[in-house]
Amino acid sequence: MPYFVFRMASVAGLPECLAEAPTYREARSILRELRAREGEAAQVRMVFAANEIEAADLLTQPRTPDPSLYGADD
């Protein structure tokens, strides 16, 4: 499965696919280059998925917080 690099668009929150890489190292270098070029405010994300549609879907789904990060609820 490849790695996909997306820019999170401010309009309607739809991600825009910028690149696809077969290995993590290649995707990481693309990601770092884009972030350096666009500045820290750029919302560029990397995701590991079977195809571009699944990757975009994963990026648009809300993430639930991990309860173990907040300690026990005794």
Image: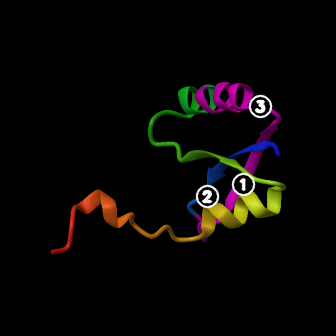
| Dot 1 amino acid type | Glu
Residue 74 placement (x, y as % from top left): 15, 75
On residue 23, the disc is 3
**Counting residues from the N terminus, which is met first, the one under dot 3 or under dot 1?**
1
Give the number of the mark in front: 3 or 2.
3
Residue closest to the far bottom: 74
**Counting residues from the N terminus, which is met first, the one under dot 2 or under dot 1?**
2
From which residue to which does the magenta span run?
A: 11-32
In the picture, measured across the screen, residue 32 lies left or right of residue 41, that is right
State yes or no: residue 12 in magenta.
yes
Residue at image location 22% in from the left, 61% down from the top:
71
On residue 9, the disc is 2
Disc 3, SS:
loop
User: With respect to residue 33, does 1 lie above or below?
Assistant: below
Q: Nearer the viewer, residue 2 or 74?
A: 74
Find out whether the residues at labels 2 and 1 contact each other: C-beta distance under 8 Å.
yes
Residue 42 placement (x, y as % from top left): 52, 43
Q: CA distance from mark 3 to mark 2?
A: 25 Å
User: With respect to residue 70, does 74 lie above or below?
Assistant: below
State yes or no: residue 39 in magenta.
no
Residue 51 placement (x, y as % from top left): 84, 55
Residue closest to the far left: 74
In the picture, measured across the screen, residue 3 lies left or right of residue 43, that is right
Q: Which residue is mark 1?
A: 16
On residue 58, the disc is none
